[in-house]
Image (cartoon, grey):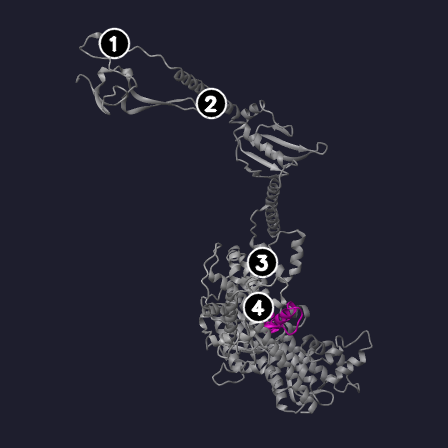
Amino acid sequence: MQTGAHFFLLRSGVSDVLETFVQVCADHFDASCIEKTTSYTDPRTGRVIEVALPVPRLRPGSVPMVFPGCPSYLSVRDQSTRETLDAKRSRQDASQLARAVEESLASYEAEQERDRFSSLEELRARLQGVSVSPKWTVIHKEECSMFLNIIDYREPCLNASLTVFANLEVFACYQGSSINNLRSAVVPDSVQKVSSLLEILNNLSMLSEERCTYRHLAQAIHSLLDKLEASIDEGKKETVNFMKEQLLLLSAKRIQYSAQVMVFACILRTISPHAYKFLRSTGALTLPHPSTIRNVCSSIQMCPQVDSSDETFLQYVSQRFKHLQAHEHTVTLMLDEIHIKPCLDYKGGNICGAAVNSNEAATSVHVFMIQSLLSAFKEVAHILPVKTLQGEDLHCMLKKVILGLEEIGYRVIAVVCDNNSLNRKAMKMFLPEPKFSPVYPHPADPDRPLFYVVDAVHLFKCIRNNWLNQKNAGTCFFYPRFELSNNEVHPECKMTASFRHLRDLHKEESPLLLKSGYGLTSKALNPSSFERQDVKLVLQVFNPHVAEALAARKGHTDFQHATATAEFIKIILRWWSIVNVKTPSKGFHHRNVYEEPMSNHTDDPKASFLSAFITWLDVWEFYRHDTGVLTQETLSALRLSAQSLLALVNYCVSELHFKYILLGKVQTDPLESRFGQYRQMAGGQYHISVRQLCETEGRIRLQNALPRMSNDDLRGIEETDSVRDAGTSFSVHVSDADLDELRAQMPVIGYVGGYCAHAAMKVLKCESCQRQLVVTGNTAETGEDTHSLIAQLDRGGLKFPSALVIAVVMYTEVVVRKLMTESTSTQFLHGPNQKNVVRQLTLDSLPRLEDIDTCENGHTYELLITLVANCAANIMLNNLCKQRNDLLRIEKDQKAKNRKARIFLGK
């Protein structure tokens, strides 16, 4: 059988005796018996898919029928077999389905062709065959086709419109404003189908119907606001942006506020929490929750312990420096002291109120503030709580602050403070041989000057106080004559300024409604110790109206020294007018040349007066009277202040190229004003605590810093634990003897442990952990000392702590007690977040008392004892502060008793 091609054919029922693969000759089989392709009918479309077989095969039931060279009857061809009924039915179904699909496709193509248009003419033709809602008035023009929704036909008003232009671009409007979004769809730039056009018209209709959702209306209003924003002035766009944001916040699922809204909300809440709460409750504005604001504000909270560390020293003024212009970098450093209420305060894991120079409560705070000479910039740079600070320590801190400011980029040219002996001693140390001087070498550069200016406001009050304190007849000053007309001093001519004349003038005019000595009051003439600090009362004494009223009584027998008293008031008033200029136009408005800014002109009358004023003070000091003169401290400070101001003006104009200088900026008034803010924001108290001072300063810093924050600054604000490894600097060992000392306190320790367990359970909310923290009333031994106090006070809600909780409380008590020993108390109180320190030391000292596995909720043994230790540390530290405050109160009362006893005994 080698007469034809040979194939490997699969066995297909040829013979049961054949092997799996046999070699047969294709010439002996009819072509219809060999399958070379296979077919598949798609049931969805009826399409027959035919694929070639990789290996030909025989059809089932095929037998050899062609035998060349053999009798013909052996090669009879098999007649065509009849198609089976199932095969025929499948073939017909597939054919009908295929025909139906073709007809459907043809119908779809025809429908799409009728829906499609490529020009305005075709659009108009297509619209004749469709039904447009009667709400729309269609107007065809040569250049466009308009679909108008007109309401109220008596007074027609265009509600919405859709315009299709010749290039098939579309333009949708609602209430006169273009819109780009309708419902959940976007208005396309162009349209080429009638169905798309009808969908846009339907969506436009939805905006004016009752079934229109809030979101659709909000999108339309937002588009109107966009149009409004584009047509108004630049200064009013912020208002429109605020309205747009509030509109979006009403429908936002995940609210995210802009930087402007966050700044507004934070500042409003820091100024008045009650106003913020009321504004949120009205629903008029969508504002952040107070907890959100607290998270933002927590990043700028102030803590003396943190601010004193080298990593964060002057950090706030360093951040503010980035937002300053170059001309704002020249500053003066103001220093003043505020007396506070000595107490320790525990809050938020921190003990606040300890002095930085001892382990006792601070009695005063030295505040360092910088003020720019050429702008309104002023900020507190550093706060130093102290108790009995020495001059050497103040000098070191003052030098550290100056060098830190210079390193940041500020240019400190002067130190301004009052005439306190501590401040004088600190400033003297800038020279190798300490002495009183108006100019010292700068610590950052010895070739630069550092001017020392005594606060003019303080000196102004000292002059009045010195006058009041004169013990001679008539309460008089005996001063050399000073002619203001030509700035000449006459040492040989002594003048007498009587304070009694002021009292007589007030007594004479007090019944009158119209007075020549306008402004003079009894409080100004007889101030209390507290009222002597008020500069407004000083201005009632040194008043031009009072001076003129006295001068008018020249020759009266009751006013023997009226002229000299008036001249003395005028001298001090002229000096005050020069050193209290805070605005460039003050002299112009008051028509007073002595209230104009200082310059370095040779003919400047203000400089001439200050030079003559120094000579006048020298002559007055030369008199060396026992009475009727300024005290040595006041006179020296007054002279030094005038000398330093003259040198400062010369330096600023000549070296720094200032056009002028406002001497009113070389005062501590901004610092005194900040002290007033502290007291007012702390509830109107005069003696505030360190905690209150720091919190109010933190709120003021927020109000100043937040307007300069961007979205990225606000988004990046997160609370961080800055004392993660705080306990590593302490070494505390808890021995068995330490624990034995607590045996007598076991009922109280058990009671505290019950609360600690209760606090931990509130956080965990886990029944498995509850069994590790507390014992039930049945298993608790109420007769035992540990649970005896709880059993006596229990009404069904108290918890009986387990041995684990009792151990944590005992270790915490020992750790706190050892930290407050003399060797470690100062370091402990001066560190940040004392709670973290106590907790870490407690966990390090505590042995693993029980083999507790992690519960099904994932709560570990470490988590359990950490929560208990947190609560125990809070209780111990809070009680520690109360204990220290009680001791301070007892000490204060004892001092008061001793003082009264000495007075009673006449000692």
Instruction: Look at the image and give the residue range highlighted in magenta.
Output: 663-692
Q: CA separation, marks 2 and 1?
A: 49 Å
Q: In this rendering, does residue 213 appear at all?
A: yes
Please give the residue where the numbered disc 3 appears in the rendered image: 293
Q: CA distance from mark 2 to mark 4?
A: 88 Å
Assess disc 1: are there few (<14), some (14-19) or many (≥20) residues with their C-alpha within 10 Å of its C-alpha: few
* Residue 676 falls inside the magenta stretch: yes
Q: Name the residue at 24% across, 15% down.
A: 64
Q: Earlier in the sequence, mark 1 or mark 3?
A: 1
Question: Mark 2: which secondary structure?
Answer: helix
Of callouts 3 and 2, which one flags the residue occurring earlier in the amino acid sequence?
Answer: 2
Residue 102 to residue 726: above or below: above
Q: The disc labelled 4 sits on which kind of residue?
A: His
Q: Is residue 94 magenta?
A: no
The answer to whether marks 1 and 4 mark residues whose Cβ atoms lie closer than 8 Å is no
Q: Which mark is residue 787?
A: 4
Q: Say which of marks 1 and 3 sits in front.
A: 1
Task: Tell me the tag on residue 105.
Answer: 2
| 688 versus 131 height, above or below | below
Instruction: Find the distance from the CA under tag 4 to the CA under tag 3.
Output: 43 Å
Q: Secondary structure at mark 1?
A: loop
- Which circle, 2 or 4, is nearer the viewer? 4
* Foreground disc of the pair 1, 4: 4
Residue type beneath disc 1: Val
Q: Position of residue 260 (x, y in %)?
A: 58, 55
Mark identifier at residue 76: 1
